Amino acid sequence: MAPIDPHSFTDSTQPSTSHISLSLYFDFSSSTIHASALISLTNPHSGPFFLDTRSLSIDSVIDPQSKTPIPFSLSENDTIKGSQLSVSLSNHSSFIVTYTTSPSSTALQWLNPLQTFNKAYPFVYTQCQAIHARAVFPCQDTPAMRIRYSARLNIPDQLSAVMAARHVERRRPANNEAEELACGNSSWSAPGRMVEEFVMEQPVPPYLFAFAVGELGNREVGPRTRVFAEAAPELLDAAAREFAGTEDMIKQGEKLFGEYEWERFDLLVLPPSFPYGGMENPRMVFLTPTVIKGDASGAQVVAHELAHSWTGNLITNKTNEHFWLNEGFTTYAERRIVEVVQGEKRAALSIGIGWRGLNDEVERFKDNMEFTKLINNQEGIDPDDVYSQVPYEKGFQFLLRIERQVGRPTFDEFLKKYIATFKFKSIDTETFIDFLKANIPGIETQIDLKLWTEGTGIPPDAHEPDSSVYKMIVTLGNEFKNGRILREDEVADWQGQEWELYLKNLPKSIEASQLVGLDSRYRLSESKDYEVKVAFLQRAIAIGCRDYYNEVEKTLKEIGRMRYLRPLYTALVQGNGKEEDKVFAKRIFSEAREFYHPIAQGVVESILAKHL
C-alpha cells in the first residue's frame, strides 16, 4: 500500500475518482440518510480499491451494468481515519455503493424543531472539513484528490435544500427512480417527498462537499450573491444588511487574484451550533450567526471565505500537514480585500489581533512545538485536535515577509501567476517553494525559507504590527495595570475589533475589582459581539472573577462555534486549584453537549480529558 495522506486510506497506486453521483434519502425520524453512490474512476481497475468511510453501514457494492454484486470488505474502525472500504474490482471503471449514514455521523448535525429558529421543522447540515466527508459518503477523502459530483436529495416537501453546487431543479420523485438509482429505497417515491438536484462541474476536494436541508428563506444582496438562512424575516434582513457589501469584495478579489471561477457566491447563515466562523464551500459559503454584528464588521469573515475561492478552493493543500497553504494565503488575501473595502485601519486591527493570537497559540503548544511549524507531522494525529491559528497567522506573516522583501507590486504579480499556474490542483509546500524560487530569483538568500516553513515558533524576522492604531491600543491595555480606565471620548468610535485587541492586551495580573469596574462602565460582558464578550469572559475566568460565571454558562449554551468554546472551556479547566471551575465546566458540557455539532463535541471532550 502506498498512502498519500496520513489521514486517508487512499492508495497512490490505484486510480483516482473522477465523478460521484449521489442519491440521498433523508430520514429525519432516524437521523440517517439512505443512499447510493455511483463512483466513476479515471481508468478501469482490477484488484482491491480503497475508500475512506466513517460509521457508514455498507449494504452492497454493485456493478452498474450487470447489477451483480461486487465483493467488498470493511476494516476495523481506526479512531482517526474510520474504516477502510476495500472493493474487489475486475476491470471496473465504475461501481455503486449502497449504504446508510449513522445518527452519530461526525459530519452531520441533525437539529430537532425546538433547536431551530422557528421551532417548526427539523434541520440538517454538513461540516466535512477536515476529514468528515467520509461520514457522508464513501470516497478517497484526501484533499490530494479532486472530484466532480452530482446529487439528488430526496427530502420532505415542506423543506428545501441548498448545496455547494449548482442547483438544477426541484421536482417530484419519479416512480421508478429508486430502482434506477439502485438505492432500492421503497419510500423514495412516497407522497410528501421532493427531489432537489445539484451538480458540481469543477473538481473539488471532498472536504468542500456541503449541503443543508431545512425551512429556508433567502434575500438577494448582489448580482451573484443571495443570503440564505432559516425562514425568519428578522434573521434574513439582518444578514442581508451585514453582507450588503459582498459584491465590492468579489470585485476587489478579482482585481488582486484573477477571475472569480465559481459563478455564484451565495451565503448560508446556519443555526448557532455551527462549529466554525465560516466554511468556504464553493458557490455557497456556510456562516455562523455570530458574524451578524449589526455594523458590517462581520463581513470580514465573508472576506476570508471569499478569498478561499482562489486560495484553498482553486489551489488546495495536498494534505492537512500543509494546511498553511490554504489558510496563510487566505488570511493574507482577506486582509488585502478588507484594506480596500473597509479601510486600512480595519486591516491593521485584524493584523494586530492575529499577532496576539499567534503568540497565544505558540504558548498553547509549548509542550508540543511540532504544531507551531507551518509544515508539521500529523501521523496519528486528529487534525481537529490540533486546529489552531498557527497556519493562518504564521502563514500570513511568512507571506508578509516575502512582500516586504520584494515590494507589493512584485508580490501581487507573483500571486496572480501562482494562482493561474496551480488552479484546480492540490500542491504541497515544496511545490510552492520551488515556484517561489523560480519566479523571485535569489529569494532564498534573502529569507530563510526553511526556518519559516519547518522551524518552530515565530521567526525573528516576523514583524509585530507597527500601525498607529495598534500601538495606541496596546499601550492603553498596558496602562490598565496602573488603574488607568479608558475615557469615554477615547473609545467613542470603537467597534468590536478595537475592544477585542484591547482586552487581549490587558496585563495578566489585574484585580477582579478592576475588571468589574471596566465592565460596569462599558458593559463588555453583555456585548452583542462575541469576539468582545468571549475575550472579556476569558479574562474573568483567568483571574477567578466569579461575578461573570452566569454569563459564561449562558454563552457556552447558546453558541457552538469552537473559536469561543475552546478558550472558555480551556480557561475553566487548566491549572491547579480550580476544582470548582472544573466541576462547573463538566456540568455545562453535559447540559449543552447535544446542542453542539459532533466536531465541537469531540474538541471539548479532548479539552476536558486532558485536564480532568
Image (cartoon, rainbow, N blue to C red):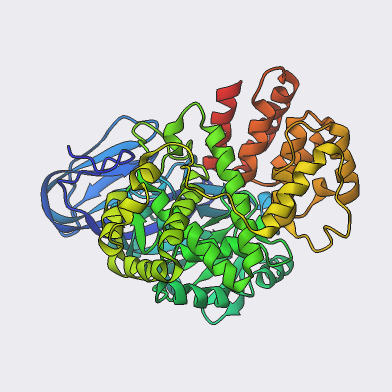
Observer-nearest of 455 and 286: 455
Observer-nearest of 510 and 465: 465
Q: In the rendered view, would you say 137 is above or below 174?
A: above
- Residue 43 placement (x, y as % from top left): 13, 58
**Residue 486 seen:** yes
Position of 182 compared to 243: left or right? left
Position of 262 compared to 141: left or right? right
- Residue 429 placement (x, y as % from top left): 32, 50
Q: In the rendered view, would you say 61 is above or below 195?
A: above
Quadrant in which the C terminus is drawn: top right
Residue at image position (44%, 61%) is 403
- Residue 91 placement (x, y as % from top left): 9, 52
Residue at image position (47%, 57%) is 400
Position of 397 compared to 121: left or right? left
Q: How many marks?
A: 0
**Residue 121 seen:** no
Observer-nearest of 224 and 527: 527
